[in-house]
């Protein structure tokens, strides 16, 4: 197993400059949600707040990728009461893990050039008896968007092979 980078030493590699011309951050307030402040999160280009917490140190060249990738990465991700993430896709599989706060609706929009009109929704949260799930998987290449049901929500997202800016597409409105 590859060695890991301690969370307090990890560096978020998401280069905001890549998105500066197309970024329309959906964060509705300039003040971060309580959980984002407590966890020292910064604004994410898709909307919401994040911080990378883990990145494996070993690299490999996955089939179908343009270069080497780490085995996996993880982030904290917070959405405030009136925030949502914009439609986006990641080349790799992304596992969403509900942590605290509101349930979250994770909507999947297929693998086309744009999100499909026919979508499916995974509801993440603590209430299994009410149809919520503690985790949900977004297969690589599938369009996704997320919003809290009520109040702010904290999730962790694990991407494998690890996240790389080249593998992220934000829907161009």
Image (spheres, rainbow, N blue to C red):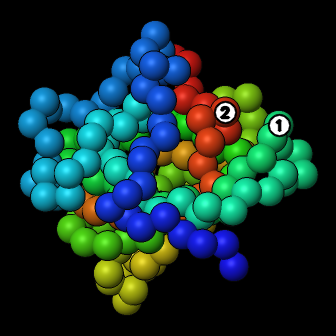
Is 65 situated above or below 156? above
Determine which quarter of the picture holds residue 75: bottom left
Q: Nearer the viewer, residue 146 or 91?
A: 91
Q: Which residue appears at 61% of the width and 61% of the height?
A: 57
In this picture, residue 131 sits left or right of residue 65: left
Residue at 43% from the left image edge and 45% from the top image edge: 12
SS label for mark 1:
loop
> Is residue 24 something that shows in the picture?
yes
User: Where does residue 35 sit, x and y in percent of width and height?
Assistant: 16, 58
Q: Where's residue 34, x and y in %?
A: 10, 54
Residue, far top? 21
Q: Nearer the viewer, residue 52 or 49?
A: 52
Q: Farthest right residue?
A: 63
Disc on the earlier residue, 1 or 2:
1
Q: Nearer the viewer, residue 42 or 6?
A: 6
Q: Which mark is residue 66?
A: 1
Tag 1 near tag 2, CB within 8 Å? yes
**Residue 138 visible somewhere in the drawing:** no
Distance of mark 1 from mark 2, alpha carbons? Answer: 9 Å
Tell me which residue sits at (67%, 38%) in the image. Answer: 167
- At 55% from the left and 29% from the top, the residue drawn is 170
Residue 122: x and y in percent read: 50, 64
Viewed as shown, does residue 117 lie left or right of 19? right
Residue carrying label 2: 166
Q: Residue furthest bottom?
A: 129
Q: Around disc 1, counting alpha carbons within 10 Å, would you say few (fewer than 14), some (14 to 19), or many (20 or more)?
A: few
């Amino acid at each position: 197993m590859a060695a890991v980078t301690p969370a307090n030493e990890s560096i978020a590699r998401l280069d905001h400059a890549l998105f500066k011309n197309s970024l329309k951050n959906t964060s509705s307030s300039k003040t971060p949600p309580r959980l984002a402040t407590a966890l020292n999160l910064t604004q994410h280009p898709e909307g919401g707040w994040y911080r990378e917490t883990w990145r494996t140190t070993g690299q490999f060249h996955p089939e179908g990728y343009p270069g080497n990738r780490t085995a996996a990465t993880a982030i904290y991700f917070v959405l405030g009461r009136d925030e949502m993430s914009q439609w986006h896709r990641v080349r790799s599989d992304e596992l969403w893990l509900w942590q605290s706060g509101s349930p979250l609706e994770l909507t999947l929009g297929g693998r086309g050039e744009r999100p499909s009109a026919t979508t499916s929704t995974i509801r993440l949260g603590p209430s299994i008896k009410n149809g919520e799930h503690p985790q949900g998987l977004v297969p690589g290449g599938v369009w996704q968007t997320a919003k809290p049901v009520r109040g702010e929500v904290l999730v962790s997202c694990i991407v494998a092979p690890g996240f790389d800016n080249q593998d992220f597409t934000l829907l161009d409105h």
